[in-house]
Amino acid sequence: MADSSSMPPAIRSVCVYCGSSNTTKPAYLDLATRFGAELAARGMRLVYGGGAVGLMGRVAKATHEGGGEVLGIMPRFLERREITYQDVPHRMVDTMHERKHIMFEESDAFVVLPGGIGTLEEAVEMLSWKRLDLHRKPIIFLSEDGFWTPFFTLMQHTVDANLTPASFQDAVVDAKSIDECFAALGARARV
């Protein structure tokens, strides 16, 4: 039997990286809404970028309306652009670096929904930190339509070029459904 002191804690707080565009595909906005509702139903706290727009706003609103706990981290310079979701607690910060650091510290795992370059940058930084053994938190990319397939093709390309070890592919999950995402979170929580 494993020593309980060496077991990772249960996942209670999930950082979600996702887009802030309201003009994206309705299916992506719907995925964010359903994911937020599921976080609330499972009693998991959402940690996110603090915005009220796009997928960010949808995941926060659904988590909050489902009775879940939400923490937004918003840089002051983005308040007008991403429009702070006022119904949930926020920590206001000065820089993107502060935002990302607090999101990391407040989370037990990371889920990456569809998003643009900012979403990708945040997720890749967490992957880089994991590659450097700075954390062991689960990282799961979630899309129902293969949105993240090109990213995983690129990762395989870096493996094929001997720039990333093949074993690192186990550090990230490409989930095709919300159920698969939560199954991966559960499995990772027991590793």
Image (cartoon, helix red, strand yellow):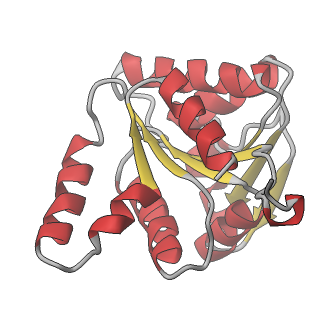
Q: Using the rendered view, name the quadrant where residue 97 is placed.
A: bottom right
Q: Is residue 81 above or below residue 143?
A: below
For the image, the number of numbered tags is 0
x, y percentage for residue 135? Answer: 62, 72
In-front residue for pair 85/180: 180
x, y percentage for residue 92? Answer: 79, 61
In-front residue for pair 42/47: 42
Give the residue displayed 58% in from the left and 53% down from the top.
138
Q: Is residue 92 above or below residue 162?
A: above
x, y percentage for residue 170? Answer: 40, 57
In-front residue for pair 93/105: 105
Give the residue displayed 35% in from the left and 29% down from the top.
24
Query: Can residue 15 be seen?
Result: no
x, y percentage for residue 159? Answer: 20, 69
Give the residue displayed 61% in from the left and 66% down from the top.
136
138 vs 150, left or right, is right
In-front residue for pair 25/134: 134
Farthest residue, direction front: 1
Q: Using the rendered view, name the quadrant where residue 11 is placed.
A: top right
Give the residue displayed 79% in from the left and 46% down from the top.
10
